[in-house]
Structure formats: structure tokens, C-alpha cells
Image (cartoon, rainbow, N blue to C red):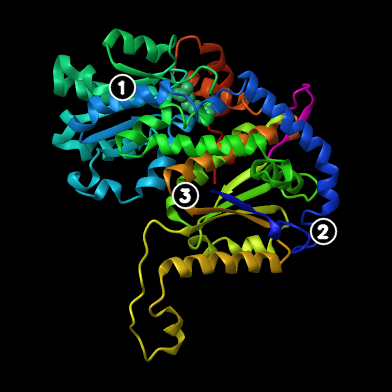
């Protein structure tokens, strides 16, 4: 079970201008009760589509049916998607199969190698496709796009589909699974015309909340991750988040501390720092969730508020050697969210060598997990000593249920934060202009007016070149 430990964000440890006080929590009592009730009501009424995913039966069943069809005859799975259509897939794979998964032998993996192409960097796309070589015929492509026409995903798909078509002729469509809207959109129409197998991106679930839908479940299940256990963990957290009184409720307390930090304590920068490479993908996923959901110009009444919490990812212990100087002595503008693992997926003992080097004796015969967790505690202490607040989310182990719990915890906390900040946590209006401008710059029909508007902006001005 994931536990939130927040003493180091309280005024028991850091000065009251930086830490949460009893009075702060008392003042938040009523707003938090209202907020929690409002979000629970949205869950009950079905407004929050993501909340129905952990207990959904049809989506995992549809995913498993396709996994049964493809797993045994697929050596490589390529996921094409971006943002909410990719970050969850990467997070699940990194956490539960680890970075070395693709390097294991086919027999040891038991499932396909997984490549998630979440950029149109030609070197990334070219290098990855070059890795397929003779395995192209047994490669499965999962193209994921809720809207069905995101430029990056569409461009990749056009390239990969053509490769498959050249290799497999009329059979190419059998090596493509499209995950998209059930009824509409360009990808939906192409899938119907070409005859791909399809999975659904639920209509009422936004991209960044969709990891527990077929968007994230298919690649996970293809790579042997127990999606039932993942969903069961999320469901257990859903029940905790909805039923526990707010001061014992990890989602409510995480939201309360984050809200107080960002408002009363002047700390709008929230650094998620996993002490585990396996959890690094979840921190990337959190960055999108927090940034797109909570960074808003307008509140729900249409007033200009310019609110937002800036999510940063740092990796322990690596970034102790690059970031902690700033976090301890720089501006008092950060809350650190540590992710700690009690029992790491594997462990290694440092050998009993260098007996004549007293400076290294503490390392002899010790486990790397002990060193890593000591580094986390030491960083926590060092931050506290400088008056810098932190909280810890503790995983007993990195398992499908605990990862499911974490995902749901942050989704629900994001909903609470949206209520507390009085913003719509489910739209992303500011992302649109960049997308439209790309269409205009690439000459998409219908974008001529915007293209003309952009021209003076993109024409280089030598006066400003150095
Ligand atoms: O969270 C979001 O809505 C975005 O990150 C989208 O997931 C991303 O832009 C990709 O969109 P689509 O799935 O429509 O291709």
C-alpha cells in the first residue's frame, strides 16, 4: 500500500513560513470537505471518466482478447503516440519491466520488445525503425490517438504503415492496432477503411488521465504486465480516496499540502524525486498531469488568474549531484515529493574489497538498496535542515498494484487541486495554438490565414542575430 508521509512538510520540522501548521489545516477544513465532496460527487455522477476505469470490465477484456491474438506471433511492439497517448505506456513499462527489458532474450522476455515513439525526431524514429530489420514482419504497431489527427503521431504512422505495406503487401493491416475514438476521427476512419483491429480511447477520459484505459493497458499486457493487478491497485486507491476522512486520506493530504505550499507558503515549484530509476517514468507522467491540468489563465468563472504549479522531475541519487545545491540554498519556492521504495525489484551487495581503504569500509558488504535509501533520508534531512519542506510517497515494492495505486492517487489529487484552485483541470486550451500554428507552417489546407499571421514572426531578423 502506498503511504504518504508528510511530517517533513510540517512546522514540526521546518519553520512555519515554509511548513504546514495546525492552523493552516484548520483553515482548510471546510474548503477541503467541500472539495472532497464535490469530487466524490463528480465520480458518482460519472463526470470524471477516469474514475470508472479501475473497475471497468469491458476495456481489459478487449485488451486481453487482442493480446491473446498477437502476443505469440509478435517479436516487437511499436507504440506511436504522444503526450497522454505515450507517457503512461512508458511509465508502466519502465516501472514494471525495467529499462533492460528490451535487451533480454526473446525467451526471457516472453513478450515483444517495446518501443514507444513519442517524438518526430527523425534520428529517434530512424534509429528505432532500423532496429527492426528482419523482424518487421513480426512487428505489431499500436497507433494511439484520441483525436485521430495529432501531427506527430500521424506523420509517424504514415511512415510505419508504408513500411509494413511494402513488406507485407495486402496483409499489412493485420499488424496494426489502432487505439482511438470509438465513433469518429481521421484515425478511426482510416482503421475502418484499412481494416485494423481497434481499441477504444473512452470519450470522457482526457489523454493525460487515460493510462488505465486501453491506451496504457494494451502495451503493458503485451509485455506481460498483470493489468488486472494494476487496475485492482487503482481501485483500492479509489476506495481509500473516496471514503477516508480527509486528514487520513492520502489524496486529500497530498492536495492540501500541495495547495498550501503553492499558495500560503510561496512554493509553486513541485519537484518529484524518485529514488528509483524504475519510477522515473511515473515522474514524467506526473509532470504532464500536473502541468496541463493545473496551469491555467482563467478560473472557472472566467477571471484571469494565471495559476499553476510547475512540476519538475529529479532522480535520486543522481540529481543530488546536480540539483540539491539549488534546492537547499536557492529560492524558497519548492516542495519536494520523494518517491521511496522499501523493497527494490532487485538488490546487489557491494563486495568485501579494499580492506585497506578505511574511507570505503562503510560500503563493504552493504546492499545498494540500503545505500540508495540512506541517500534519500540524508537528502530529506539536509533539506529540512535548510527549512525546505518535503513529503514522501512510500512504495513497499514496485508492483502492478502499487503502480495502479500511485496513478489513481495522482489523478484524484489532481481533481482535488482543480477544485481548490477553482480551475478546469480537464482542458488544455493553451496547447491548441501551437498545434494550429504547426498546421499553418506545414501548409495544411484551411490554415492560410494563420500562416499569413505567423509569417512576420518566423521571418528571421538579422538585427537580433549574434
Ligand atoms: O493529455 C492530452 O490531452 C494530450 O497530451 C494528448 O494526449 C496528446 O496531445 C495526444 O493527443 P491525441 O491522443 O489526440 O493524439
Point 53% across, 68% down: residue? 375
Q: Position of residue 275 (x, y in %)?
A: 50, 58
* 301 part of magenta stretch: yes
User: Image height check: is 133 above or below 385?
Assistant: above
User: Image height check: is 382 above or below 9?
Assistant: below
Q: Earlier in the sequence, mark 1 or mark 2?
A: 2
**Lateral position of residue 296 relative to residue 184, left or right:** right
Q: CA distance from mark 1 to mark 2?
A: 54 Å
Task: Tell me the residue that label 1 is attached to.
Answer: 177
**Residues tagged 3 and 2 counted as in contact (Cβ below 8 A):** no
Point 78% across, 31% down: residue? 34
Q: Earlier in the sequence, mark 3 or mark 2?
A: 2
Q: CA distance from mark 1 to mark 3?
A: 27 Å
Q: Position of residue 392 (x, y in %)?
A: 61, 55
Task: Tell me the residue that label 2 is attached to.
Answer: 16
User: Image height check: is 417 above or below 365?
Assistant: above
Instruction: Name the quadrant containing residue 74.
Output: top left
Task: Tell me the residue that label 3 is attached to.
Answer: 280
Q: Earlier in the sequence, mark 1 or mark 3?
A: 1
> Which stretch appears magenta?
298-308
- Category of crowding for the residue at label 3, using alpha-carbon neighbours closer than 10 angstroms: few (below 14), some (14–19), many (at least 20): many
Point 24% across, 35% down: residue? 76
Q: Position of residue 414 (x, y in %)?
A: 63, 35
Q: Is residue 373 visible?
A: yes
Q: CA distance from mark 3 to mark 2?
A: 31 Å
Q: Secondary structure at mark 2?
A: loop
Q: Secondary structure at mark 1?
A: strand
Q: Nearer the viewer, residue 439 or 42?
A: 42
Q: Nearer the viewer, residue 360 or 122?
A: 360
* 60 part of magenta stretch: no
**Residues tagged 1 and 2 counted as in contact (Cβ below 8 A):** no
**Lateral position of residue 74 relative to residue 376, left or right:** left
Amino acid at each position: 500500500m502506498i503511504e504518504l508521509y508528510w511530517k517533513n512538510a510540517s512546522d514540526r520540522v521546518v519553520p512555519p513560513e515554509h511548513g504546514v501548521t495546525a492552523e493552516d489545516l484548520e483553515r482548510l477544513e471546510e474548503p477541503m470537505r467541500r472539495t472532497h465532496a464535490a469530487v466524490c460527487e463528480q465520480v458518482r455522477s460519472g463526470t470524471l471518466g477516469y474514475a470508472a476505469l479501475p473497475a471497468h470490465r469491458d476495456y481489459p477484456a478487449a485488451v486481453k482478447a487482442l493480446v491473446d491474438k498477437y502476443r505469440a506471433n509478435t517479436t516487437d511492439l511499436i507504440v506511436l503516440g504522444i503526450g497522454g497517448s505515450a507517457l503512461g505506456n512508458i511509465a508502466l513499462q519502465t516501472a514494471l519491466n525495467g529499462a533492460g527489458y528490451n535487451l533480454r532474450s526473446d525467451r526471457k522476455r516472453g513478450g515483444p520488445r517495446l518501443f514507444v515513439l513519442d517524438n518526430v525526431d527523425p534520428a529517434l524514429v530512424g534509429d528505432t525503425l532500423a532496429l527492426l530489420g528482419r523482424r518487421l514482419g513480426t512487428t505489431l504497431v499500436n497507433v494511439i490517438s484520441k483525436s485521430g489527427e495529432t501531427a506527430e503521431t500521424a506523420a509517424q504512422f504514415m511512415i510505419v504503415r508504408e513500411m509494413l505495406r511494402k513488406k507485407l503487401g495486402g496483409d499489412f493491416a493485420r499488424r496494426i492496432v489502432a487505439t482511438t475514438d470509438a465513433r469518429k476521427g481521421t484515425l478511426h476512419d482510416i482503421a475502418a477503411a484499412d481494416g485494423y483491429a481497434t481499441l477504444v480511447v473512452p470519450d470522457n477520459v482526457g489523454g493525460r488521465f487515460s493510462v488505465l484505459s486501453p491506451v496504457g493497458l494494451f502495451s503493458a499486457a503485451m509485455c506481460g504486465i498483470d493489468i488486472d493487478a494494476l487496475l485492482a491497485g487503482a481501485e483500492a486507491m479509489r476506495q481509500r480516496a473516496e471514503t477516508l476522512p480527509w486528514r487520513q486520506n492520502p489524496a486529500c493530504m497530498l492536495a492540501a499540502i500541495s495547495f498550501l505550499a503553492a499558495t500560503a507558503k510561496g512554493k509553486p515549484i513541485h519537484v518529484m524525486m524518485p529514488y528509483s530509476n524504475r519510477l522515473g517514468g511515473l515522474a514524467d507522467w506526473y509532470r504532464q498531469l500536473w502541468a496541463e491540468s493545473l496551469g491555467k489563465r482563467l478560473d472557472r468563472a472566467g477571471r484571469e488568474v494565471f495559476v499553476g504549479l510547475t512540476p519538475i522531475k529529479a532522480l535520486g541519487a543522481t540529481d543530488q549531484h546536480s540539483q540539491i545545491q539549488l534546492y537547499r540554498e536557492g529560492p524558497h519556492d519548492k516542495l519536494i515529493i520523494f518517491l521511496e521504495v522499501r523493497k527494490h525489484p532487485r538488490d546487489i551487495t557491494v563486495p568485501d574489497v579494499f580492506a585497506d581503504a578505511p574511507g570505503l569500509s562503510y560500503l563493504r558488504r552493504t546492499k545498494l538498496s540500503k545505500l540508495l535509501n540512506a541517500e534519500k533520508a540524508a537528502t530529506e534531512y539536509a533539506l529540512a535542515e535548510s527549512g525546505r519542506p518535503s513529503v514522501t510517497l512510500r512504495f513497499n515494492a514496485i508492483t502492478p498494484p502499487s503502480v495502479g495505486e500511485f496513478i489513481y492517487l495522482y489523478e484524484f489529487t489532481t481533481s482535488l487541486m482543480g477544485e481548490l484552485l477553482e480551475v478546469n483541470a480537464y482542458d488544455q486550451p493553451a496547447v491548441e495554438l501551437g498545434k494550429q500554428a504547426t498546421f499553418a507552417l506545414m501548409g495544411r489546407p484551411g490554415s492560410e490565414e494563420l500562416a499569413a499571421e505567423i509569417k512576420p514572426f518566423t521571418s528571421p531578423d538579422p538585427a537580433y542575430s549574434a
